[in-house]
Amino acid sequence: MTGSPDLTSRDALAYAASRLVRHSAEFGPAPVLAEAGPEARLVLMAGETVILRTDPEQTGTALLGPDEAERAGARAVEIFLGRVEGWPVFAGAVAEEATSLFPAPGYRALDLRALAAEGAVAREEQGLIATAKSLLAWHARHRFCGNCGSPTAIAAGGFRRECGACGLHHFPRTDPVAIMLVRRGDACLLGRGRHFKPGMYSCLAGFIEPGETVEDAVRRETREETGIAVGAVAYHASQPWPFPASLMLGCVAEGLTEDVRTDPDELEDARWFPRAEVVQMIAGTHPEGLTVPPPTAIAHLLLRDWVDGVIAAPPAPQG
């Protein structure tokens, strides 16, 4: 896959920037919070929400000091993420009731979708929070060994779990998703799921299956959902999506056919939209009130870069 996207067009993407110098299972022993000192910072997740310190004069932050984090009580899981500007950064899962222990107006609990939509923290902190959310969610779902069923234990600071019974090592997983702008001539193919807000259309998307290339996933998902055949595919950009731990791989594809046959089990509707109409949808001026996802989503980036001429034509299929 090839592509030369304009990097400046990606500034609004949620979770796509991080100052974290991350730890990994290959880095040896991780620091222990109790010995990390007052410079340690913690990201606290209470269910699907993160606890933020707020300040009316500046952007909020999820990087709490040890004394602040103690208010939340015991942490069901505590892991070491890495370092930010030399500070050791940890993440902890706390009870949902812990959010009530932080006095307003100095703190708030916010789910990650709202956090991105509001710009509640600096963009470079969103990626760090996404890492914390995805890792903690993985630990919550992998407390037992998938091989023998025995309990597993946290290792490598949280970037691995180990089974004491059979010795198997388990590593955090990321679920790859292909999301694609399918175009033909001066129009692009957009669909809407039944869960979309009224009037919103977006790029098609689907999980990449085992043994499948990104290009073939784009072709398969497009064919399954709309009946449209796809030829050349080019990679454009990516976005971490911590719900719970996906990676959106944004692609541009060439549609080879025009007749849309929507699968009702997959989509409520799908159709070709002329470029001029997409411009109106992005601007919020479409006469029918139709819209596209917000700038925080990679679908918006694909559409905006297409109408702005940033996206070049994909290469011809090989073989």
Image (spheres, rainbow, N blue to C red):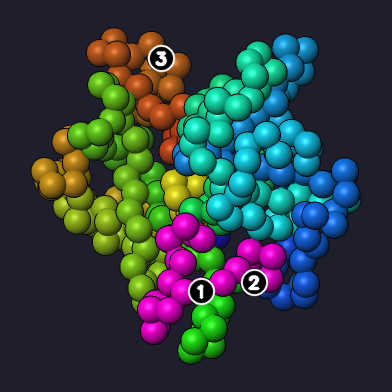
**214 relative to 54 in the view: left or right:** left
The count of marks equals 3
150 shown above or below 303: below
Residue indicated by mark 3: 284
Which amino acid does the dot numbered 1 rest on? Thr
Give the SS element for disc 2.
strand
Q: How dense is the environment of label 1, judged by Cα within 10 Å: few (below 14), some, or many (20 and up)?
A: many
Residue lying at 46% horizontally and 27% vertically, measured from the top left:
294
Occupied quadrant, residue 7: top right
- Relative to 140, 105 lies left or right: right
Name the amino acid type tagged 3.
Gly
| Residue extent of the magenta highlight | 138-159
Q: Which residue is mark 1?
A: 152
**Residue 157 magenta-highlighted:** yes
Q: Is residue 23 visible from the viewing direction of this image?
A: yes
Q: Determine which residue is flagged by label 2.
A: 155
Image quadrant where one finds the C terminus: bottom left
Closer to the camera in the image, 15 or 38: 38
Tags 3 and 1 touching, CB below 8 Å: no
